[in-house]
C-alpha cells in the first residue's frame, strides 16, 4: 500500500494511492497546485496501484471484449477496450517493452492500475480516467485554450496548429486585464444548468496550472484566414463547432457520446458560439473582445 494523495480538480475529489510518492511531482507536474488534503467529499476517482486476478483475465481474454478506439501517443499504442460496463485503457510501449493498464467500471470511483517500468504515462492515463468518471456527471476535459477576462472565460477551440495558443497570446499582449487559465485541456462542467470552465493539471506545452473556475462567456472556434471575420453560429453549427474538441476515444463509444452530446446541448442553449476567421494579429483579438464585451 502506498501513500494516498488527495487532489481537487473541477470541484471533484481525486485520490491516488501509489508507491511513486518520492517522485510523484515529477511524474505528475502541475498536480501540486491541485493538492487538497482536507477534501473529504465523495471521490470522483479513487486510484490504487493494484490489479485483481479478474482484471488480469480481462486483459488476457478476448471473449466479449470490444476495442472502442486505438490511437498513438508519441511512439506508444493506446487502446480503450470495453466489456459490458467495464473498460480498460492500455498504453503499450514501443516494441512491447511494457504496458500501462487502467481498469474502470461505469458508476464506480474505483480505478485500479498497473504501470509499465516507466511511469510517465500516469499523467495521460489519469486524464482518460477523469474523462471516464466525469463525462456521465457532465464534466469533461476539452481541447481548448482559455482566456479569463472581466471575471469570465472565453474558450478558443480548433485543431492542433490552427492558432489557438497564438490567438490567446495576442490577448495577453494587447488586451489589458486578460489572463490565461489553461492552454490545452481545461475542464468544462455543467453546474445549475450553466457551463463553467476550470483550470486543470493537464496543460500541454504551456504548463499553465491554475486552480480557478469561471463562468463561460462565449466559445470561439478558430480558423486561419487572410482577413479577420467573426461569425455567430446557429444551433447546428454551434454543435458541430464543439463536438470534435471533446476526448476522441469517448466519442467512439455510444454511452459516453450520448453524455457528451448532452453537455454540448447545455452549453449551446445558454452560451453564444462563434467562428473566427483570423490573421495572427492584434486586430483579431481586439475584434473578439469588443464583440463579446461591448
Image: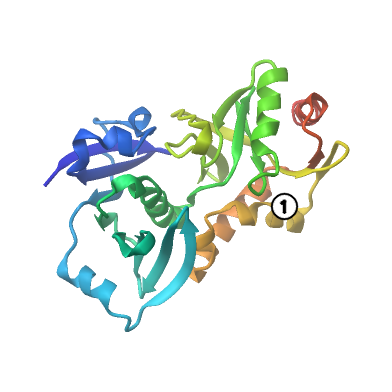
Query: Quick one: label 1, few (<14), some, or many (20+) residues within 10 Å?
Result: many
Left or right of residue 170: residue 187: left
Left or right of residue 97: residue 276: right
Where residue 262 sits in the image (x, y, percent)?
Answer: 57, 58
Taking the spot 58% from the left edge, 27% from the top edge, the residue there is 180
Where residue 9 sits in the image (x, y, percent)?
Answer: 39, 38
Task: Give above or below for 182 relative to 96.
Answer: above
Left or right of residue 206: residue 158: right
Residue 43 in sight here: no
- Residue 273 position by quadrant: top right
Residue where numbered disc 1 is placed: 238
Left or right of residue 31: residue 191: right
Q: Quick one: which residue is furthest to the top in this view?
A: 176
- The quadrant the C terminus occupies is top right
- Residue 176 position by quadrant: top right
Closer to the camera in the image, 10 or 244: 244
Where residue 125 sits in the image (x, y, percent)?
Answer: 37, 52
Where residue 105 sits in the image (x, y, percent)?
Answer: 32, 64
State how many labels appear: 1
Q: Quick one: which residue is furthest to the right in this view?
A: 227
Taking the spot 63% from the left edge, 56% from the top edge, the residue there is 243
Q: Quick one: which residue is furthest to the front in this view?
A: 95
Scheme by which the image is coloured: rainbow
Q: Quick one: which residue is furthest to the bottom in this view?
A: 63
Residue 157 in sight here: yes
Q: Secondary structure at mark 1?
A: helix
Taking the spot 24% from the left edge, 30% from the top edge, the residue there is 38
- Residue 175 position by quadrant: top right
Amino acid at each position: 500500500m502506498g501513500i494516498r494523495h488527495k487532489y481537487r480538480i473541477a470541484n471533484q475529489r481525486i485520490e491516488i494511492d501509489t508507491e511513486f510518492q518520492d517522485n510523484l511531482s515529477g511524474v505528475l507536474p502541475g498536480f501540486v497546485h491541485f493538492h487538497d488534503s482536507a477534501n473529504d467529499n465523495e471521490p470522483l476517482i479513487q486510484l490504487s496501484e493494484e490489479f485483481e486476478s479478474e482484471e488480469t483475465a480481462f486483459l488476457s481474454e478476448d471473449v466479449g471484449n470490444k476495442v472502442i478506439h486505438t490511437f498513438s501517443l508519441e511512439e506508444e499504442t493506446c487502446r480503450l477496450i470495453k466489456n459490458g460496463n467495464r473498460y480498460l485503457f492500455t498504453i503499450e510501449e514501443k516494441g512491447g517493452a511494457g504496458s500501462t493498464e487502467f481498469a474502470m467500471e461505469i458508476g464506480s470511483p474505483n480505478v485500479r492500475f498497473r504501470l509499465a517500468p516507466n511511469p510517465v504515462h500516469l499523467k495521460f492515463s489519469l486524464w482518460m480516467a477523469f474523462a471516464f468518471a466525469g463525462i456521465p456527471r457532465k464534466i469533461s476535459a476539452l481541447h481548448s485554450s482559455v482566456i479569463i477576462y472581466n471575471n469570465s472565460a472565453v474558450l478558443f477551440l480548433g485543431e492542433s496548429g490552427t492558432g489557438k495558443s497564438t490567438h490567446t497570446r495576442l490577448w495577453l499582449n494587447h488586451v489589458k486585464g486578460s489572463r490565461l487559465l489553461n492552454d490545452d485541456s481545461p475542464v468544462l462542467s455543467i453546474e445549475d444548468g450553466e457551463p463553467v470552465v476550470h483550470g486543470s493539471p493537464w496543460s500541454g506545452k504551456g504548463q499553465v496550472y491554475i486552480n480557478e473556475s469561471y463562468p463561460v462567456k462565449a466559445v470561439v472556434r478558430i480558423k486561419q484566414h487572410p482577413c479577420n471575420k467573426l461569425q455567430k453560429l446557429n444551433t447546428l453549427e454551434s454543435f458541430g463547432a464543439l463536438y470534435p474538441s471533446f476526448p476522441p476515444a469517448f466519442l467512439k463509444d455510444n454511452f459516453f457520446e450520448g453524455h457528451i452530446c448532452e453537455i454540448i446541448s447545455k452549453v449551446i442553449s445558454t452560451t453564444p458560439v462563434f467562428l473566427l476567421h483570423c490573421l495572427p494579429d492584434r486586430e483579431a483579438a481586439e475584434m473578439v473582445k469588443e464583440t463579446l464585451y461591448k
